[in-house]
Amino acid sequence: MFIDELIDKIKEKNNPTVVGLDPRIEYVPSVIRACAFHEHGENIKGAAEAIWIFNRRIIDSVHDVVPAVKPQLAYYEMYGVEGLRVFDRTVKYAKEKGLLVIADGKRNDIGSTAEAYSTAFLGKTQVDGGVFEEAFGADALTVNPYLGCDGISPFIEDCKKYEKGIFILVKTSNKSSGQLQDIVAQDGRSIYEIVAGHVAEWGQGVMGKYGYSSVGAVVGATYPEQAKILRGIMKNSYILVPGYGAQGGTAGDIANSFNKDGLGAIVNASRSIMCAYKSDIWKDRYGEDRFDEACRAEAIRMREDINSAI
Ligand SMILES: O=c1ccn([C@@H]2O[C@H](COP(=O)(O)O)[C@@H](O)[C@H]2O)c(=O)[nH]1
């Protein structure tokens, strides 16, 4: 099941972090861009090709360091159909390299449409006469809880049926997340605490061998105090922690998302890894041409940083 596989890989690599693949054409080194534009034209197709090569080289450089990657759908959808093709190739390539893939799509809708979203990312699509085929075939998906439990159930059913995982938004890392999530709504509890209670309950039917559920939560690194409360409410839920690095979250900030067993959370970094070759730490050692080596160096630095804090 997803959560056991994730924990096995975290243990094997001694690394509770995930590399976010949120590519923008301006992150791609100029030589790769020029080559792709020359071959495919200076258009969306050329940009998509350049991004694919960028992603592939990042995956090649970090696949033995991290347990998983987290491509964010928006960065592929912005290149239309060509971008979605790159998303698909990226998912397949990462899996070939032994990585788990967490698709960050924050999907949901009314039950029937949630079911279609779940089929697209976690389940199998019925093609013809009972033949089923994986569409995107991610290992896990981020999910929005705003529609309530009938929007969540289809994803949980697919977690059970296909051994997949979901991470439900509980307390997001952005500045205005408190505008709705912090509203005190019931018995002195905030909305994020109430959602966390549901996440804990929804996860009960999908528990793995380590005592964690394949139904996890998203809690931003930028809210360490809230993370402490949430860790207490969702004792068996794995927490996906975005906001480390580019958004200012530090290793100290993420410590509250972990349990005493050193498990319970996986920390994401996207821009700080993808653009490591431009950072003050690595730019003098690795130029544009060696951007992939800079990604690897930053992924290793992040692993050490996080491990030293938990
Ligand atoms: O609360 C949330 C939920 C998701 N994200 C996503 O994580 C990455 C963060 O990227 P960085 O470059 O490391 O800041 C991105 O895909 C977000 O959409 C989040 O940041 N906060």
Image: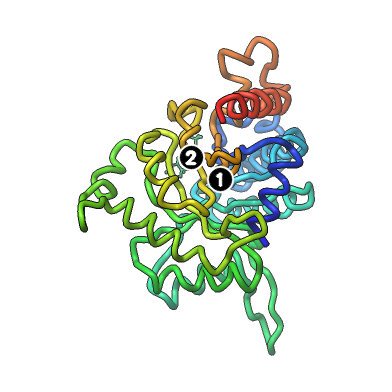
> Residue 251: x percent and y percent?
52, 27
Q: Which mark is residue 97?
A: none
Say if 278 sits above or below 190 in the image: above
Circle 1 SS class: loop
Which residue is the extreme one toward the top?
284
- Residue in view at x 61 percent, y 40 percent: 18
Element type at mark 2: helix
Nearer the N terminus, badge 2 or badge 1? 2
Residue 229, how many percent across, how many down?
37, 43
Cβ–Cβ under 8 Å for marks 2 and 1:
yes
Residue at the bottom extreme? 129
- Which residue was labeled with disc 2? 257
Mark yes or no: residue 72 visible.
yes
Q: Residue furthest front?
A: 260
* Residue 147 found in image quarter: bottom left
Q: Residues within 10 Å of mark 2 (few under 14, many from 20)?
A: many
The quarter of the displayed image where residue 160 is located: bottom right
103 lies above or below 256: below
Q: Which mark is residue 264?
A: 1
* Side of 230 where 291 appears, left or right: right
Query: Residue 79 at x, y = what percent?
Result: 54, 49
Q: What residue is drawn where x is 58% and y is 29%?
A: 306
Q: Is residue 297 left or right of residue 120?
A: right
Q: Position of residue 131 (x, y in %)?
A: 71, 83
Indicate the quadrant containing the C terminus: top left, top right, bottom left or bottom right.
top right
Q: Can residue 30 be seen by looking at this rendering?
A: no
Q: Disc 1 residue type?
A: Gly
Would the CB of label 1 be found within 8 Å of ligand 1?
Answer: no
